[in-house]
Amino acid sequence: MGNILDGKKLAEEIKSDVKKEVEALNKFGIDVGLALLLVGDNPASLQYFKTTVGTCRKVGITAYEYRLPRTATLNEILNTVHSINGDERISGLLLLMPLPVHINARRVINSIVPEKDVDGLGAISVGRLAADESTFQLFKGGGKDLHQYFKLLPSIWSFLPCTPYGVIRLLEHHKIEIKGKHAVIIGKSLAVGKPLSLMFLAKEATVTVCHRETQNLAHFTRQADILCSATGKAGLIRGTMVKKGAIVVDIGINMLKNGTITGDVDFKPVAEKASMITPVPGGVGPVTIAMLLENTVRSAQRNEIIKSPLMIV
Ligand SMILES: NC(=O)c1ccc[n+]([C@@H]2O[C@H](COP(=O)([O-])OP(=O)(O)OC[C@H]3O[C@@H](n4cnc5c(N)ncnc54)[C@H](OP(=O)(O)O)[C@@H]3O)[C@@H](O)[C@H]2O)c1
């Protein structure tokens, strides 16, 4: 049975650090705020909305709750985003997905200013990740060593998407070497698979990305030293598809008919072959929220550093 890659413990550590950093900013009279924007009432999104609001409170971040009806127009949503963009109290914006089908989601995501794009999904943030302009955060204690970046232009600062960033942090927390390893990622979405592949490349892994059109998926998964699945297909990864000793990261979240939550991985047989494996729930999920909060406090810190270069936080 492989060892468990526990995300809850890491998430608690990250949140505890965030709390201290929020308190340090509070001493300068700076409140850290995260806006959450939910359009409609998708149950999973509403659940994530509420959980995030509760977690913000625990670390001292003020949550600004914005809710629009499912019938909201694109212009109404954009106006809300613009008002958040200009609100000095707010350091980051989480836009809950999916948006209603009549809304062009990319248009809305790209209207978030990069400085507040703490979910890292806007075109500028994604471009900076691809151009290796934001990947330094993967190497320096989560971007904590801010002072050495004073010399860098503010324009290169943007945030890494929370879920893939959380995967890298989870692996590193468990002292798993990435450099030189073969990372196989299943899923190529903009939120998870694609940015995760870029992060693994930045960490000098050899990367294979699989998706729905991949022929003979098992041929690729069996080659993985690190196998990450982000498809939303329960039971996709079976025991026979995994190399003995592999590290398995299950990013999928699936609600079964009986109400239980499961990942993409058939846990028991895969855990018997893997050297380490994430559970669902309790693996990548808790770290994702922790990374969102960390990005939010970084945004507040960077904003102050840019405006008051002598400030030490
Ligand atoms: N743990 C967390 O914090 C967290 C955060 C975000 C998402 N998630 C979960 O992660 C999963 C993926 O999320 P997402 O936003 O990336 O979803 P998505 O946008 O629907 O993307 C799913 C990806 O999986 C691929 N795929 C689907 N079925 C496949 C199959 N049978 N074989 C191979 N590839 C397949 C798709 O390929 P094509 O591109 O070819 O269609 C697509 O690239 C979901 O379960 C979601 O709930 C978890």
Image (tube, grey):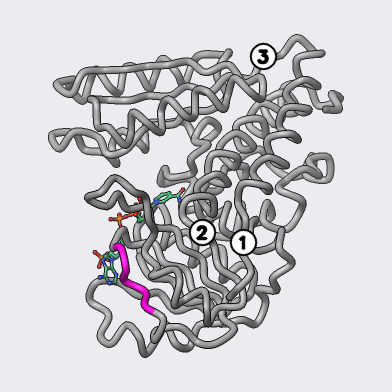
Q: Which residues are magenta?
A: 234-238
Quarter where residue 173 is shown: bottom right
Image location (x, y in percent) of residue 297:
66, 30
Residue 218 horizontal side relative to residue 136, left or right: left
Q: Using the image, determine if residue 192 lies above or below residue 154.
A: below
Badge 3 is on which residue? 31
Residue furthest to the front: 258
The structure residue drawn at horizontal position 53% and vertical position 82%, both measured from the top left corner, is 273
Of the numbered discs 2 and 3, the one sitting upstream in the chain is: 3
Q: Is residue 75 magenta?
A: no
Q: Position of residue 98 (x, y in %)?
A: 27, 39
What's the residue type where badge 3 is placed?
Asp
> Dots 1 and 3: beta carbons under 8 Å?
no
Mark 1 or 3, nearer chain start? 1
Q: Quadrant of the N terminus?
A: bottom right
What secondary structure is marked by label 1?
loop
**Disc ID at residue 279:** 2
Towards the viewer: 88 or 215: 215
Q: CA distance from mark 1 to mark 3?
A: 34 Å
Asked whether the beta carbons under mark 1 and mark 2 sit within 8 Å of each other, the answer is yes
Secondary element type, mark 3: loop
Q: Residue at x 39, y 19 (%)?
A: 82
Mark 2 CB near ligand 1 (8 Å cut): no
Residue that carries the numbered disc 1 in the rendered image: 5
Q: Compared to 134, does 15 lie above or below?
A: above
Q: Is residue 224 left or right of residue 144?
A: left
